[in-house]
Structure formats: structure tokens, C-alpha cells
Amino acid sequence: MAITKEQWEQIEANLSGVFGFVELVCDGYKINAQVQQDKMKLVVSVYVDGIMKGEWIFNAANSEIPRKFHCEKKRPACGTIMRAWYLEQSKSRTWSKQERADYAAKAKETTSTWLPYWTSAKAFCRHIRKTCTSIEIVKIGH
């Protein structure tokens, strides 16, 4: 059974509140999404089959779970000073064309971490709709 637009709005409204909780079954995985406090802000934490593994944060290539349900954060692979130096070297005429291309590529490199929480309910719902083929509502609210 497909989830209607009104049900998606109900899920987003529930997860936008302070004590929000939604239980879904997405592609055979039991997903518990609940609003929790992270430092001074509220986030939507995602538990897959009732657990949240630390190995999913950095090893998304080994498992489909983080790519399907967690939030990807990309950060530059090197610091600001090194990135500026790489960009400067990529424009320098002292290097060959291939070396300049390598420096430009190093300046654009990023690393990804997969965080088990979302900063907004709307982003969580949009990502779930995009990555999962079958979604069923089990329970909305506690």
C-alpha cells in the first residue's frame, strides 16, 4: 500500500515536534525514527532494526543501510591552507598539464561520513522516498 501525501505530511509533522516517533518498514528493514536532542538542537535519529552501529558512519561501502537511511556529510579531505595551495599549483605554469589536473583534483577531494540522524524531518522523508522502493507505516507517535 502506497503512503498518501496526507500520511507523509502527518509523518513530517510528528517528527517536527519534540517527542516525535515514527515506525516504518522500508525494503524489509524496521526503521524507528525519533526526535532526540543533540547538543542544543533537536534531530531525527534513525534506528535500523532497533540498532545504530558505529561502523556504519565511516564504512558505507560495506553496507547498504547507511546509504539508504542515514545522512551523508561531505567534508574536504584536506585543510583550507592545503586546498588553497593545491588550487594555486593547479594554475601554475611550472607544472605539466597532467600535474596541474592532479593538483586540481586533490583540491576538490572530499570524505564522506554517514550520520545516523537528520537535522530536519522533511529531509529525512525526502531521502526515504528517494532510496526505498517499498515503505509501510507501522506506527506514528508513541
Image: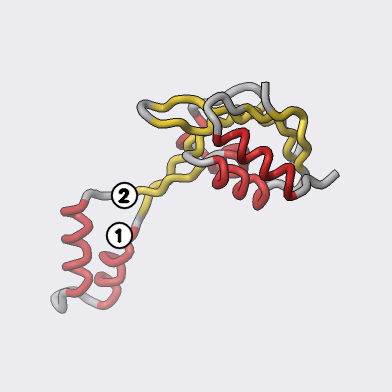
Q: Amino acid at mark 1?
A: Lys
Between the residue at mark 1 and the residue at mark 2, the CA separation in whole angstroms equals: 8 Å
Camera-side residue: 71 or 100? 71
On screen, residue 123 versus residue 58, left or right, reads right
Q: Position of residue 12 (x, y in %)?
A: 62, 40
Q: Position of residue 36 (x, y in %)?
A: 50, 25
Label 1 Cα crowd, 10 Å radius (few <14 / some 14-19 / many 20+): some
Q: Secondary structure at mark 2?
A: loop
Residue 105 visible to the viewer: yes
How many discs mark residues in the rendered view? 2
Quadrant position of residue 26: top right
Disc sitting over residue 106 in the figure: 1
Disc sitting over residue 77 in the figure: 2
Relative to 110, residue 61 above or below: above
Q: Position of residue 15 (x, y in %)?
A: 59, 34
**Whether label 1 touches label 2, CB < 8 Å:** yes
Relative to 57, residue 102 above or below: below
Quadrant position of residue 52: top right
